[in-house]
């Protein structure tokens, strides 16, 4: 495709040749081909592309003239492609060549593999169905670049085979986007929110203390079985919000559980003791003579079946209180 741009005539030439502009039927000799194509990207230096295009972004680049000009442009293209992989033109307006406008020509490579630029599509990633817009088509490897938003509303671009894409109508795409917005809201949290999650196959609950949007994790304060306040980090995806009423109800139940595993010196307790192979369980009763809150174990004195006095360390969670 030939790309042309309008070049301004020097002021003197305009004044001396003003009669030319009144003759629209004559050939305009001010038009020139200035675009250079590198890696499929058209380069324009201090000129404006003639064909219609969409502006994408302005990025910082560094073009050096000490080495190969071709290599400098190649490096600039590769750098820009990492964040904006769907442009096909670069317009340098600054004489320093330190910034460049990234553009995408309308009508260039608009249809391949059954999809087109700006097509609305769906694709599967893991167990998640995503919805996006085709922003680039590649003929060499049969792939399309699709721009979409992940569950954290962050813009992503993914290359996918044409066969992995399902075209969608504008109506279906908008419908799916509305559904997606509702799903996104589930994973938006604020400091102070009450939440639940699963920890080692057990349900846990707590309060959001801080949020790390870079790693999508929340710091949660919760109370463990022994009544200790613990701070842990949990992925947003693993959290579910609960009401203040539900939180208070769970907290009351937790306090009752903590009370069951809180002991005093001299307290009478019982537990189940098995042999070395975990067989022949027997119920043992004894008296607490020492408490180790660091490891949550109690030293319990008891009399075995041979009428001999023994002392054994038993986890708080394995002990039950004997009511007086």
Image (cartoon, grey):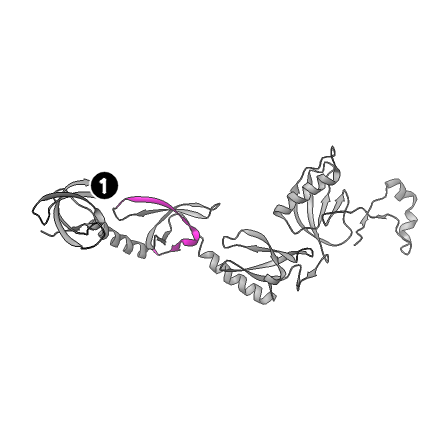
Q: Is mark 1 on a helix, strand or loop?
A: loop
Which residue, given by chain and number where applicable, does mark 1 sit on?
293
Rendering quarter of residue 309:
top left
Q: Quarter of the image containing the N terminus?
A: bottom right
* Residue 238 part of the magenta segment: yes
- Furthest-front residue in this view: 277
Foreground: 306 or 117?
306
Which residues fall within the magenta stretch?
227-243
User: Taking 198 as reference, is 271 left or right?
Assistant: left
Foreground: 9 or 215?
215
Residue shown at 82% from the left, 48% from the top: 33
* Residue 64 part of the magenta segment: no
Q: Position of residue 68 (x, y in %)?
A: 74, 37
Residue shown at 58% from the left, 67% from the top: 171
Q: Where is residue 189 in the image (x, y as percent from the top left)?
A: 42, 51
How dense is the environment of label 1, judged by Cα within 10 Å: few (below 14), some, or many (20 and up)?
A: few
> Compared to 74, does 241 lie above or below?
below
User: Taking 277 as reference, is 267 left or right?
Assistant: left
Foreground: 171 or 134?
134
Numbered marks: total:
1
Q: Position of residue 75 (x, y in %)?
A: 68, 41
Q: Where is residue 53 in the image (x, y as percent from the top left)?
A: 72, 53
């Amino acid at each position: 495709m030939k790309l042309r741009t309008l070049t301004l005539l020097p002021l003197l030439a305009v004044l001396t040749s003003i009669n030319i502009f009144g003759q629209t039927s004559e050939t305009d000799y001010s038009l020139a081909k200035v675009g250079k194509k590198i890696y499929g990207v058209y380069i324009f230096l201090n000129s404006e592309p003639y064909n219609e295009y969409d502006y994408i972004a302005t990025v910082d680049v560094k073009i050096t003239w000490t080495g190969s000009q071709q290599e400098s442009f190649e490096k600039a293209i590769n750098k820009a492609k990492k964040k904006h992989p769907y442009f096909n033109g670069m317009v340098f307006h600054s004489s320093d060549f330190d910034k460049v406008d990234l553009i995408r020509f309308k009508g260039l490579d608009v249809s391949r593999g059954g999809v087109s630029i700006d097509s609305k599509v769906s694709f599967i990633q893991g167990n998640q169905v995503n919805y996006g817009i085709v922003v680039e088509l590649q003929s060499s490897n049969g792939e399309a670049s699709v721009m979409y938003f992940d569950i954290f509303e962050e813009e992503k671009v993914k290359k996918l085979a044409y066969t992995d894409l399902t075209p969608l109508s504008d109506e279906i795409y908008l419908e799916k986007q509305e559904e997606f917005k509702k799903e996104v809201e589930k994973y938006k949290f604020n400091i102070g929110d009450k939440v639940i999650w699963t920890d080692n196959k057990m349900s846990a609950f707590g309060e959001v203390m801080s949020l790390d949007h870079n790693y999508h994790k929340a710091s949660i304060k919760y109370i463990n079985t022994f009544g200790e306040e613990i701070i842990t980090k949990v992925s947003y995806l693993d959290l579910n919000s609960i009401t203040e009423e539900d939180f208070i109800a769970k907290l009351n139940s937790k306090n009752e559980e903590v009370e069951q595993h809180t002991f005093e010196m001299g307290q009478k307790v019982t537990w189940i003791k098995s042999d070395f192979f975990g067989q022949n369980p027997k119920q043992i009763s004894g008296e607490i003579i020492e408490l180790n809150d660091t490891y949550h174990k109690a030293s319990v004195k008891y009399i075995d079946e041979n009428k001999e006095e023994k002392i054994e360390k038993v986890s708080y969670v394995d002990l039950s209180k004997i009511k007086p």
